[in-house]
Image (cartoon, helix red, strand yellow):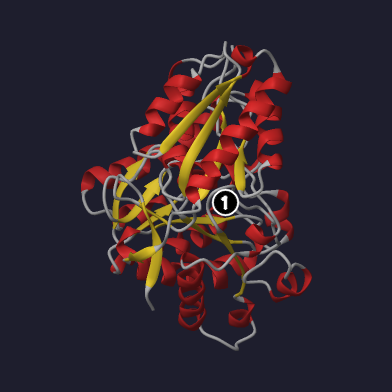
């Protein structure tokens, strides 16, 4: 099958061609939403951050917003700021424009308030959207693709069916010269030694142990038991009894490929192959981090069912639970419950995921895209000051 995509000025390849209206700070969220709703064909990203942040916490938010702006699925960006926030909208726009794509800035205080800013923003966005209409897809190679691996609302079927089948697809991408990202560090606990054995060298293995230890220590600093959230109440009701059991199922999403390295939240992998990104287990924050790290496509398994999508990257939803498929088929793209029922093998479902993935790369809309799900959130390191 030939693959088609949008080749960007920096050489990256998009599988979507979005005009992104991006908030630099929580204070500009309503203006961003108003502009995007008035310009059909645009997408928006809003968030709760951008001010009152210090040090590495601020740097992480900046890195995330720059990353989503630079994501290859985004063709051009309208950055909307308030004007007095910590995260300077002009600096954010400049960093994004390093990718070669068109970036415009709108500052609410400079326009004299929200109503004037919305009117001007609509005019800018409509002009930018018109420019995108002339862009055409070109033949691309799978080696340009970066996939994000996520699991949410997991149950006992996730580790038995959906995640191993996703692992087949992940290995296919890696063997084709592409890149795959495994996330959710708290869900490695108890299985970190297995991942470390797959590291390409001792330094990478050491980093895997380090990020898991950091996740455990972060929970201890709060004086709470990690088991209050890992596994979650829903995980337990779905048949997962311990964090180790959840972790053993979680890591199967990454197949059997060697692990090339570990990157921080919203940081781009430094090469091809399988990488680990240090993210929380929170689904939306984890997906947002990987997409900021350059992923154009998300494979997302869910045993109990979740509608979560992403504003700029298609999310292929996969369930290993036959009952969830029947109950939430409006939200789920792939039924891996056939493995549980003995109808198909893991390899067979893996090949179905690959086929669906290639179709989505070529433009097929996922269920989350059809329903307009665009959840986005940035994880925090420190308190707001």
> What residue appears at the point 33 percent right and 65 percent down from the top-left corner?
140
Residue at the limit of the structure toward the left, as seen here: 201
Q: Find residue 185 and report its horizontal and vertical position in percent.
A: 47, 45
Q: Is residue 88 above or below residue 96?
A: above
Residue 155 on image: x %, y %: 65, 62
Where is 209 relative to 328, above or below? above
Q: Residue at x 44, y 27 (%)?
A: 93
**Closest to the observer: 118 or 325?**
118
Q: Quadrant of residue 49?
A: top right
Q: Which residue is mark 1?
A: 243
In the image: residue 72, left or right of residue 238: left
Q: Furthest-bottom residue in view?
A: 343
222 is higher (above) or lower (below) than 257? above
Q: How packed is label 1: few (under 14 Cα within 10 Å), some, or many (20 or more)?
A: many
- Residue 291 image offset from top left, x and y in percent: 47, 46
* Rendered-image quadrant of the N terminus: bottom left
Is 378 on the left-hand or right-hand side of 11?
Answer: right
């Amino acid at each position: 099958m030939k693959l088609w995509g949008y080749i960007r000025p920096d050489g990256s390849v998009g599988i979507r061609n979005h005009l992104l209206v991006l908030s630099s700070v929580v204070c500009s969220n309503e203006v961003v939403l108003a502009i995007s709703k008035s310009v059909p064909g645009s997408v928006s990203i809003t968030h709760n951050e951008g001010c009152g942040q210090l040090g590495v916490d601020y740097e992480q938010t900046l890195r995330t917003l720059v990353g989503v702006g630079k994501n290859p699925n985004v063709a051009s960006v309208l950055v909307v700021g308030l004007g007095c926030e910590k995260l300077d909208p002009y600096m954010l726009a400049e960093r994004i424009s390093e990718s070669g794509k068109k970036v415009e800035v709108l500052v609410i205080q400079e326009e004299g308030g929200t109503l004037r800013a919305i009117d001007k923003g609509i005019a800018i966005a409509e002009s930018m959207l018109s420019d995108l209409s002339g862009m055409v897809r070109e033949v691309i190679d799978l080696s340009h693709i970066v996939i994000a691996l996520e699991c949410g609302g997991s149950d006992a079927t996730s580790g038995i069916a959906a995640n191993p089948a996703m692992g087949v697809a992940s290995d296919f991408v890696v063997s084709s010269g592409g890149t795959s990202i495994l996330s959710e560090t708290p869900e490695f606990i108890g299985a970190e030694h297995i991942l470390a054995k797959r590291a390409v060298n001792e330094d990478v293995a050491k980093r895997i142990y380090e990020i898991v230890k950091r996740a455990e220590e972060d929970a201890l600093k709060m004086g709470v038991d990690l088991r209050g959230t890992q596994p979650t109440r829903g995980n337990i009701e779905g048949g997962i009894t311990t964090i180790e059991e959840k972790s053993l199922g979680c890591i199967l999403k990454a197949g059997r490929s060697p692990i090339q390295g570990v990157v921080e939240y919203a940081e781009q992998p430094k090469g091809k192959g399988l990488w680990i990104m240090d993210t929380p287990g929170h689904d939306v924050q984890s997906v947002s981090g990987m997409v900021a790290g350059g992923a154009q496509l998300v494979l997302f398994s869910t045993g109990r069912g979740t509608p979560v999508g992403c504003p700029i990257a298609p999310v292929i939803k996969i369930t290993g639970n036959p009952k969830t498929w029947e109950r939430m088929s409006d939200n789920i793209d792939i039924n891996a419950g056939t493995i549980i029922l003995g109808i198909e093998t893991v390899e067979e479902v893996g090949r179905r995921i690959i086929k669906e993935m290639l179709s989505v790369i070529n433009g097929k809309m996922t269920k989350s895209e059809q329903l307009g799900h665009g959840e986005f959130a940035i994880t925090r390191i420190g308190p707001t000051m």
